[in-house]
Image (spheres, helix red, strand yellow):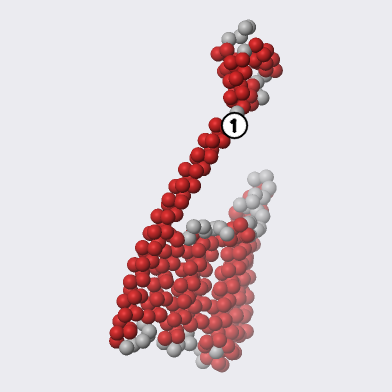
Amino acid sequence: MKYECDMISDLLPLYKDGICSDASKKIIEEHLAECPACGKMLNDMNDDTIDEKIVKEKNEVIDSQAKFFKRKSAVAGSIVGGIFCVPILVCLIVDLATGAGLSWFFIVLAAMMIPASLFVVPLMVRKNRMFNTMISFTASVILLLAVLSIYTCGNWFFIAASATLFGLTMCFAPFIAFRKPVTEHLKNRKGLAVMGAYTATFALMMICIGFSVGPKAFFPLAFAIAAPLVAMAWGIFASIRYLKGNALVKTGASFASVGVCTWLLDVLVGSFGATATSMTGVTYYSTSNSVVGITFIGIAALLIILGIIIGLAKGGNKNA
């Protein structure tokens, strides 16, 4: 043979992958025609049975470990759930023994749902743990408020529940938007969805408060104050998220949103203030000349001009 098998064996992996030169390929093929041992070595390289067996064994080990940890989590969740059942059982026995019926039983039951949602749900749920934990925690808090409202014969449930929902949305919405299965549906609209959730829960809270304290006295002034503030938040969000330009341009647009909404707040409060004053007895004042709003708009205009100049000096606007 013209070439040694050791040299050919070093070249066989390159030949198998088709990345050797034409000259090396010709030499290897001539050698394989004369050397059965190197031909067998090439056939063994082309045999994927061993690789498939290794992959299969690896997947079996991973699945086995996953099932093991799932069983451990289920056992731990069952134990923790059993611990949480102890105060519920004690309350039930005490209520029945004292003849109080189930007066406190449902309150304790609803209260224990809160720690259960934080400890048991993550251990028992196999997929989307954070999403399911946040949803179950929110539901358990609302349930507790409902039970307390029923047992106290109060009419405050809708105010408390809507305010609690708004607060929890402020905390949880950004995390839920980036977790499965929500993130798969939102894709690149996560920020828009979070802002929509904030606005919807805030509006729900204001509606519940209005119907509880008196719509005629509440809604006009509440709209005059809340609408510009919500518009301000949306303006700042849109400026930062969707406006194309450098940071100074976006900062200027945000200031412009603050200035316009401040002016609008001043105008609306001045318009609805007289009506609210006659109904509530509380005097509401307006600056009428909108000095704050004009100041913000002036600063915003200056920042926008500076941003454009700096952006052009750098070779064009950049997306922040």
Q: Nearer the viewer, residue 301 or 126?
A: 126
Visible residue check, residue 75: yes
Lateral position of residue 31 relative to residue 71, left or right: right
Visible residue check, residue 254: no
Lateral position of residue 156 relative to residue 29, left or right: left
**Residue sitting at x 46%, y 47%:** 64
Q: Quadrant of residue 304?
A: bottom right
Q: Quadrant of residue 41?
A: top right
Count of labels shown?
Answer: 1
**Residue sitting at x 70%, y 17%:** 22
Q: Is residue 157 above or below residue 3?
A: below
Task: Give the farthest residue toward the top.
Answer: 2
Q: Quadrant of residue 24?
A: top right
Residue 232 at x, y = what percent? 60, 69
Q: Is residue 108 above or below residue 154?
A: above
**Residue sitting at x 65%, y 15%:** 32
| Residue type marked 1 | Asp
Q: Nearer the viewer, residue 248 or 292?
A: 248
Residue 305 at x, y = what percent? 65, 57
Lateral position of residue 108 relative to residue 318, left or right: left
Residue 318 at x, y = what percent? 65, 49
Location of the N terminus by quadrant is top right
Q: Nearer the viewer, residue 273 or 50?
A: 50
Residue position for label 1: 48
The 10 Å Cα crowd at callout 1, few under 14, some 14 to 19, many 20 or more, is few
Label 1: element kind: loop
Residue 185 at x, y = what percent? 63, 59
**Residue sitting at x 46%, y 51%:** 67
